[in-house]
Amino acid sequence: YTDEEGTDTAIALPANVLTTLAIGADGNSLDYTDELGAVNNIPLADNDATNEIQTLSISGDQLTISDGNTVTLPQPTLTVTKETIGYVFAAAHTLANGTNSFNINSSVTRTGTGRYTVAFTTAHPNGASYDITFGAQEDLVNRDSRLVSVVTGTQTANGFDVMVATGDNGTTADPLVDEVWYFNTSATKEVVTDVVQFVSLLGVSTTGSSATPIGNPDSSILFLDNFADRNTFSMQYRNTTGTATDYEVLISNTAYSTIPNVSSGNYTITTANNADGTYNHLITSTAPLAAYTNIIISGNQPSPAGDNYGTQNPAAPVTVTFYTR
């Protein structure tokens, strides 16, 4: 920015907050453009050409100007959605001689007749407590059941020992045999399913005089046709004269601090916190409103919702006042 003595001063800004910062074309405002391209207007306290801003500082998300007013800059919010899923932690298909024909996060070694050792590449996140599913081949003629089991006491986070036996229909221990067999074991993990970043395009929430009109109160030129803020926000007003005019509209004492998804047009909207639980919203024209034309500003339902369904006279305590410049 340039002060009244002609000195240019550079301003270092935090990343992803402001992209441009300049005195507005009318000389009465400080305008900045955020990273989404929305132009935000900060009206200055006066229109004295010899009293430009002398100091301007940023700390965190607060912009402080020389008269002590502060402006909260819009910050991105990040919403991350997660869910827990099951997946195959380890698996293998092993030939009778111990050859591994398929592996996931594991290796299998034959240590003796019908004896095999499974080693995980990485330790199981559940330690020694995990499920194991086995399968084995069996010839169609003999139909001697192959029994694949974990050797008791060998299951750890790093793997387990396996024995493959064949049923002998007797009372003695089933004999061990070499056979084609396979296994898999599962685990769970948390995954991100959606990430949403949101930056408000409404403008800024300010304290001090930033939402104070600089024009003259004048209800003879602009007329309010409609005002609603209960189910949705809608306001329509018109120029009743044959002359184009620059203007300001002050919506006072609302319970809501923002107008969600407000429509865009030849105007800016600045919000001020009244520090009593209410807020003022100042609409400032960026181009003259043509003769005998109207304008509609709309948005989603404010939170908390107002009391106006649609009227030329907003319900108390909300008031609408027109100014011309």
Image (cartoon, helix red, strand yellow):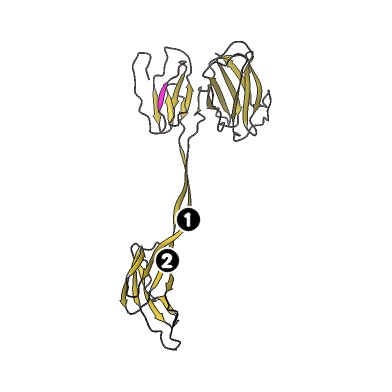
Against 115, residue 274 (above or below) is above
Range of residues picked out in magenta? 13-25
Look at the image and tell me in which quarter the C terminus lies.
top right
22 drawn magenta: yes
**Tag 2: amino acid:** Thr
Of mark 1 and mark 2, the one earlier in the sequence is: 1
* Residue 296 shows in this picture: yes
Task: Name, please, the residue furthest toward the front.
Answer: 141
Q: Which residue is mark 2?
A: 185
Please indicate whether residue 291 sits to the left or right of residue 4 in the image. right
Please indicate whether residue 67 sits to the left or right of residue 223 in the image. left
- The chief SS type of the magenta part is loop
Against 7, residue 276 (above or below) is below
The residues bearing labels 1 and 2 have C-alpha atoms spaced at a distance of 17 Å
Secondary structure beneath dot 1 equals strand
Look at the image and tell me in which quarter the N terminus lies.
top left
- Residue 144 position within the rendered picture, expressed as x and y whole percent measured from the top left: 44, 82
Q: Residue at (48%, 53%) from the top-left corner?
A: 83
Q: Which residue is mark 1?
A: 84
Against 1, residue 172 (above or below) is below
User: Where, by quadrant of the figure, is residue 249 drawn?
Assistant: top right
User: Where, by quadrant of the figure, is residue 101 drawn?
Assistant: bottom left
User: Where, by quadrant of the figure, is residue 76 drawn?
Assistant: top left
Q: Nearer the viewer, mark 1 or mark 2?
A: 2
Please indicate whether residue 146 sits to the left or right of residue 309 in the image. left
Of 128 and 167, the residue lying toward us: 167
**Tag 1: amino acid:** Thr
191 drawn magenta: no
